[in-house]
Image (cartoon, grey):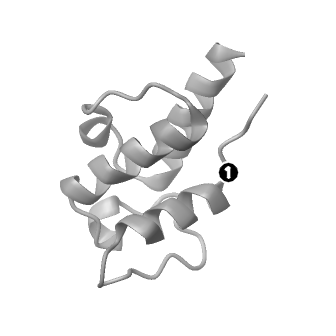
Amino acid sequence: MQRFTIDDLRRILRQCAGEEEQSLDGDILERSFDELGYDSLALLETTSRISKEFSVKLSDDIAAEVDTPGELLAFVNEKLAAMA
């Protein structure tokens, strides 16, 4: 089974950040996406890239359902586990 890791999430978030790359060093799992500087558009792009790269179906609503990278990480891994 393929796993979605914090390093995968950091890489994709950095790709979606645009010019104003946010600091994703250290423990970011419980920090809110707002606190990290990611708006809803960046999260939509992030979930779209995760969907494509990991072949997992994520609805556009997921960006409104998760508040932290840890929640997104857990959600994606639950979807991947269900597909196995």
Q: As drawn, is 80 to the left or to the right of 36?
A: right
Q: As drawn, is 74 to the left or to the right of 61?
A: right
User: In terms of image quadrants, where is residue 78?
Assistant: top right
Which is more toward the observer, 29 or 59? 59
On screen, residue 37 above or below 75: below
- Residue positioned 39% across, 52% down in the render: 46
On screen, residue 59 above or below 82: below
x then y, percent, for residue 47: 39, 44
- Residue positioned 55% across, 65% down in the render: 10
Quadrant including the N terminus: top right
Task: Find numbered disc 1 in the image and state the secondary structure of the residue it sits on.
Answer: loop
Which is more toward the observer, 55 or 60? 55
Q: Which residue lies furthest to the right in this view?
A: 1
Quadrant including the C terminus: top right
x then y, percent, for residue 13: 44, 63
On screen, residue 17 above or below 71: below
Mark 1: few/some/many CA within 10 Å (<14, 14-19, 20+): few
x then y, percent, for residue 63: 29, 42
Q: How many labels does the image show?
A: 1
On screen, residue 57 above or below 66: above
Q: Which residue lies furthest to the front in this view?
A: 52
Q: As drawn, is 80 to the left or to the right of 32?
A: right
Which is more toward the observer, 3 or 72? 3
Question: What amino acid type should be assigned to the residue bearing mark 1?
Answer: Thr
Which is more toward the observer, 36 or 51? 51
x then y, percent, for residue 12: 50, 60
Residue, disc 1: 5
- Residue positioned 74% across, 34% down in the render: 2
